[in-house]
Image (cartoon, helix red, strand yellow):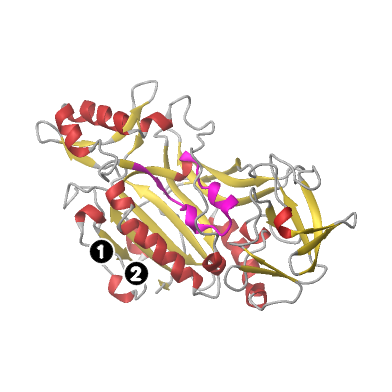
Amino acid sequence: MRELIITAVLVVIAGAANSLAPRAGCAISINQHLPDPQALVINPQGSLDIFGFYLPQTGDVVSFDVGQEVLFACPGATLNVTGTPEALATCVDGTTFQLSDGTQYDFTLLGCTKLPFHTYQDTGRLCGRPQEIYPIYGFGFELSDGTFYKILETCFDPEKASTRYSVFVQTPEIRGYQSGYPRPSFFLEGPFYNGFDVYQAYTRDNQTATLANILGSMDLALQYVNQSFSSSFYMARGHLAAKADYVYGAHQRATFWYLNVAPQWQTFNEANWAQLEYDARIYSGLRNGPLMVYTGTHGQAVLPDINDNLQPLYLGLDANNNPIVHVPEIYWKVLYDPLTKEGVAFVGSNNPYLDNPPGFVKCTNVCDQLTWLNWDPQNVTAGLSYCCEVNELAATVLEIPDLTVTGLLT
């Protein structure tokens, strides 16, 4: 998988510099001109990944030459003005585009009858170290002719019903992302959980009941999972590839699959992990080329039971009463430049109650070499955190893919 993604990234790097120059013709603001529901804005000559979509060149503005072709697509729906799932148009000027039949429309009118449908594909590839045994699923959009635009991949362990990592390409154009786009009201399960109710598993009531069973005490479980909705002491659906890691709102919605989340204490999710995600986006936006971003989980968090014995945490049991949807001991993230082969890793403790979790993987801390990171790494509640050399962390965290890393990305 790594080779395929890196190849796709390298193919577009050569032309990235030229794409930054403003062009005369049409200019579309991501935050002002997208209709609701928005259509996918596809470059017919682009690749079948994130680079197949037109991305902003200056701020949040996408510029088109006069006569440049744009494929407007509404997977699972139709375009308002044509009644078809896709339509090819060309830039006229300003925000005006012309369809093949000669009719012209303002960009703001080229929307869909409903939100574009995102789906998944089994890539047929495997992941895992030291032995590749886990399936890789791609997430994105399928057009009416079967063409699939993939914007995210996950490495999934079906036996534990737990995702090992997600990977996507972060482009500098993230600086012009569509801000404030509403979150969907639900996550998609797909066929990956064999009838297990993942939605129910993440409810506070289920977390409390499950912890009570694991720890032997409802009173103890209630101490860990606070039932007040103003409290952050509960396990959220922690995104691996975050919503705000994508430019378009339609793409942001495609991150809402249970395969792209893991149980994450909200105290950590909203603090050090959120700060790392935010700072990584700012850092990516200041660069000249794309980064590959891997985000994953490792180990199993523990808490002391009624007899003060540490017990591994999970959110449910499968049909054979085996624990599934494990609560990770740590979250990790790797930023990797496929051109320079430089990388940097981050690791954070997913446990607000233990200041020295037995399964927490530490590394030689290199945070002092990064000037762009603004988290609070020694705060246990916010998530005890480190910056690492990729190769050092990967020696212990086998979920990290085999990457050729020759230097520290700073």
Left or right: where 382 falls relative to 394: left
Tell me the crowding category of disc 2: few under 14, some 14 to 19, or many 20 or more residues within 10 angstroms, Cα based. some
Left or right: where 369 falls relative to 289: left
Q: Which residue is mark 1?
A: 376
Query: Looking at the picture, which amino acid does disc 1 mark?
Result: Asp
Residue 232 placement (x, y as % from top left) = 27, 46
Residue 89 placement (x, y as % from top left) = 81, 58
Disc 2 is placed on an element classified as loop
Residue 16 placement (x, y as % from top left) = 63, 73
Query: Looking at the picture, which amino acid does disc 2 mark?
Result: Leu
Choose top left, top right, bottom left or bottom right for residue 345: bottom left
Residues at marks 2 and 1, CA–CA distance in whole angstroms: 9 Å
Height in image: 236 above or below 387? above
Look at the image and give the residue range highlighted in magenta: 236-258
Left or right: where 6 falls relative to 163: right
Q: Which mark is residue 373?
A: 2
Residue 158 placement (x, y as % from top left) = 45, 34
